[in-house]
Image: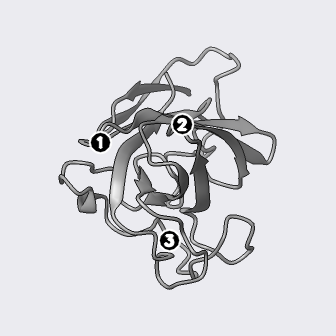
Amino acid sequence: MRICFLCSPVLLVLACASTASSPDTLDAGAAPVVSGAIATVQSNAGVAGTVEFVPEGEMVRVKVELTGLEPGPHGFHIHESGDCSAEDFTSAGGHFNPHERQHGSRSDDQRHAGDFGNVDASADGVVSVELEMDVVLDPAAGDSVIGKAVIVHANADDLKSQPSGAAGPRVACGVISPAV
């Protein structure tokens, strides 16, 4: 069975065709595999950039490139809905938390799947950082980040306040889509 992806933030279509054996042929019941994912982050306040999700063995390298932020730390999370339509980005819902855990830092064993901690903007408002995270990129899995939203907050995440780290207003949003 050949798996093909037609990608958009809202639409993910799996098409089956082909009986020939090839590297993308999967056994029946096997999970679809993506080569990565990307979110284009933007705001009405001049924040812009990309967040790339690249599988590396058991982990995923998250490459964050942002501009236009106030200098200092900013809460950086995955939220439950891939919807950035509200002006204040509340349409993205709360933190992505499919396993119903407490909020915490990205290094905590028991944390929301969307708890990515903080990213630090330089004096000129730029973030350029890579994080190693244990997130799921299988679009068929209930705990996949694909189809969710990346949210950047105005303030630092305190890494302990429940349910979201008291990181303040949402200043930027981007929908996570499979990489093309």
Residue 49, given in percent of the width and then of the height, sits at 45, 32
Horizontal side of residue 31 vs 78, given as left or right: right
**Residue at the spot of label 2:** 126
Rendered image: mark on residue 97: 3
The amino acid on which the numbered mark 3 sits, given as a three-letter code, is Asn
**Which residue is more in the foreground, 101 or 161?**
161
The amino acid on which the numbered mark 1 sits, given as a three-letter code, is Ser
Q: On screen, 169 above or below 1?
A: below
Quadrant (top left, top right, bottom left, bottom right) of the N terminus:
top right
Query: Quadrant of residue 154 in the image?
Result: bottom left
Q: Are marks 3 and 2 in contact (CB under 8 Å)?
A: no
Q: Residue at x 23, y 57 (%)?
A: 88
Rendered image: mark on residue 43: 1
Q: Residue at x 47, y 75 (%)?
A: 164
Query: Quadrant of residue 36 in the image?
Result: top right
Judging from the image, the colouring scheme is: one colour
Crowding at mark 2 (Cα within 10 Å: few <14, some 14-19, many 20+) = many
Say what secondary structure mark 3 lies in. Answer: loop
Q: Residue furthest right?
A: 57
Choose the circle earlier in sequence order: 3 or 2. Answer: 3
